[in-house]
Image (tube, rainbow, N blue to C red):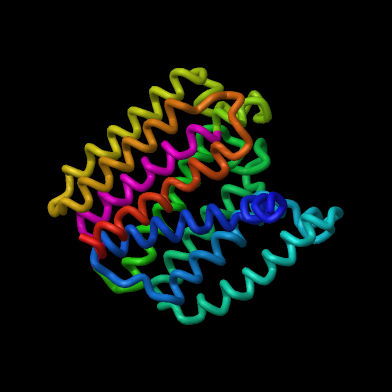
Amino acid sequence: MKRLFDFYLDASIHVSLAVVSLSMVTALFFDIPLKGHLGYFIFFGTIVNYNFIKYGVEAKKYLLVGSRYHKNIQFFSFVCFFLTCYHGWFLGMASWGVILILTGLTGLYALPVLPNARNLRSLGGLKVFMVAMVWAGITVVLPLVEMQKVLVWDVWVEVVQRILLVLALLIPFEIRDLAYDAPDLNTIPQRFGVFRAKIFGIFIVILFLGLTYAKDFVTDLELISKGMLSLVLGGLILATKRNQSKYYSSFWVEAVPMLWGGLIWAMVYWF
């Protein structure tokens, strides 16, 4: 069971469910359906992209895999790639425009594009903003574009909030990785220390919640759910330790979007 659980995390299934959950949140907030093909495209596409970033930045490394465990992840990723292509076939042209832009950002994040840096991922603080922008594009802009909705003011406020949410979620991961990150990465904990990084994370959470009131139309569902999400995420950030347990960030912190999506779904359909 532990090996299956580790595969579930290492093969990016967990993070993919988190991304789908945030897409579902967008659908519930803006009263649109999350089409089956789009939902599956986001799920399988996230697995492919995350596994490529984690294991396949170098083509040789991605194709010539040594261990049986990573071969299983490789095979799983290729299956997900074909499923991504299948479900992507049914998406509209406007959605593909958004997808190509986000794919370009992912490529800039993972592939060497600058003379003095391996990739934008190696430029310290910039990498977290790249991740947050891609998540916001996938989970907010893409579902609305696929449904041919106009991107009004409230949508762009939600995009900014989603960027802030992802930035806050990344704080525990950056604190965890202090022991492994190169000193020149200049992550937030490296620059300001663990305590100030936590304070910065709490500030982001407060800003995330406060921006809800900048929307033209806000429901009680949104206010309550975002308030509860802020309490949970703030508590996890404050409880983050440099020497944290193996699954603290990779499972519990990354499960926050699923908890939020489940909470909103329960509030909508039960109350």
Assign the magenta stretch its main secondary structure: helix
Pick the front one: 106 or 118? 106
Residue interval drawn in magenta: 150-173
Residue displayed at 68% across by 41% down = 118
> What residue is shown at x 43% (from left), y 76% (from top)?
36
The image shows residue 137 at horizontal and vertical percentages of 40, 56
Q: Is residue 63 left or right of residue 195?
A: right
Q: Residue 104: x, y in percent?
A: 53, 58
Q: How many marks?
A: 0
Q: Position of residue 204 (x, y in %)?
A: 35, 33
Q: Residue, x 39% and y 60% (percent of image)?
A: 23
Image coordinates of residue 211 in percent, x first then y, are 23, 41
Residue beneath the point at 20% across and 60% down: 271
Q: Residue furthest bottom?
A: 90
Left or right of 72 in this view: 260: left
Foreground of the two, 253 or 111: 253
Residue 64 within the magenta-colored segment of the rendering: no
Quadrant the N terminus occupies: bottom right
Residue 160 sits inside the magenta stretch:
yes
Rendered image quadrant of residue 143? bottom left
Quarter location, residue 30: bottom left
In the picture shown, does residue 244 fall above or below 63? above
Residue lying farthest to the right in this orientation: 66
Q: Is residue 198 above or below residue 37?
A: above
Q: Please state which of residues 7 and 140 is positioned toward the viewer in this rendering.
A: 7
Depicted 213 relative to depicted 40: above or below = above
